[in-house]
């Protein structure tokens, strides 16, 4: 189980020059924003990453505004460019990371595998991820699952973090979930 006290949310590369080419990009951003809102209510740190921002631009402003910190990177695997140090600087007891981002089959997957190799429990929230090709996204999800990374939905991780309806933020989280646009 993923614990509120030992988790960080990592939002990978929701960048303004990349998002227009992402299949379902706006839906992925909205899902990431919901995750970030829940994380803020639960006092879970949110770290963004930006891949080669000179070329791909900054993260979408809505995402950037939700992040406690943004790690600039050039390696596809954010671990190679200081992500672990950023996590540990915020809270050295964090040993669980929940990831969402773009592109699922490149930077998101390599960062997830890199964090797992460093000993973190890693989960990926599939509906908050995107790739240009839905097939690439699906293959990356399958590969990560095969490598022992937990694949979750938004509500799964939020309620896992929450643990009980007695939590002081339960009503606020419930309102967030009730306001969610769900497409069947």
Image: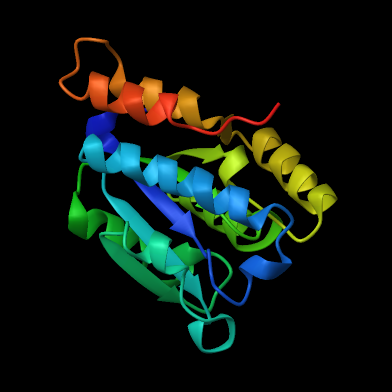
Count numbered badges in the picture: 0
Q: Dividing the image into 4 quarters, which one contains the C terminus?
A: top right
Q: Is residue 100 left or right of residue 137?
A: left
Residue furthest to the bottom in view is: 54
Nearest the camera: 180 or 15?
A: 180
Nearest the camera: 111 or 30?
A: 30
Q: Quadrant of residue 143?
A: top right
Q: Is residue 69 visible?
A: yes
- Residue 164 image point, x, y percent: 27, 11
- Position of 56 relative to 61 (above/below): below
- Residue 174 image point, x, y percent: 34, 21
Q: Is residue 116 visible?
A: no
Q: Is residue 183 left or right of residue 53?
A: right
Residue furthest to the right in view is: 135
Q: Is residue 130 left or right of residue 47?
A: right
Q: Quadrant of residue 150?
A: top right
Task: Name which residue lies at 41% across and 52% down.
Answer: 10
Q: Quadrant of residue 15?
A: bottom right
Q: Dividing the image into 4 quarters, which one contains the N terminus?
A: top left
Colour style of the rendered protein structure = rainbow
Task: Name which residue lies at 25% across and 27% down.
Answer: 172
- Position of 4 relative to 112 (above/below): above
Nearest the camera: 24 or 78?
A: 24
Task: Name which residue lies at 41% across and 41% down.
Answer: 35
- Residue 25 image point, x, y percent: 64, 57
Residue furthest to the left in view is: 168
- Position of 136 relative to 15 (above/below): above
- Residue 126 image point, x, y percent: 61, 39
Task: Name which residue lies at 38% across and 21% down.
Answer: 160
């Amino acid at each position: 189980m993923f614990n509120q006290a030992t988790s960080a949310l990592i939002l990978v590369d929701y960048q303004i020059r990349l998002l227009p080419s992402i299949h379902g990009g706006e839906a992925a951003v909205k899902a990431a924003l919901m995750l970030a809102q829940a994380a803020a209510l639960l006092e879970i740190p949110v770290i963004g990453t930006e891949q080669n921002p000179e070329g791909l631009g900054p993260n979408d402003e809505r995402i950037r505004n939700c992040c406690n910190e943004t790690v600039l990177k050039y390696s596809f695997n954010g671990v190679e460019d200081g992500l672990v140090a950023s996590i540990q600087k915020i809270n050295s007891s964090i040993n669980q990371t929940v990831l969402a981002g773009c592109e699922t089959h490149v930077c998101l997957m390599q960062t997830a595998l890199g964090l797992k190799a460093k000993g973190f429990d890693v989960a990926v929230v599939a509906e908050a991820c995107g790739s240009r090709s839905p097939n690439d996204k699906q293959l990356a999800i399958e590969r990560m699952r095969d490598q022992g990374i937990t694949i979750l939905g938004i509500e799964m991780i939020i309620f896992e973090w929450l643990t009980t309806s007695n939590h002081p933020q339960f009503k606020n989280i419930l309102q967030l979930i009730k306001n969610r646009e769900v497409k069947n």
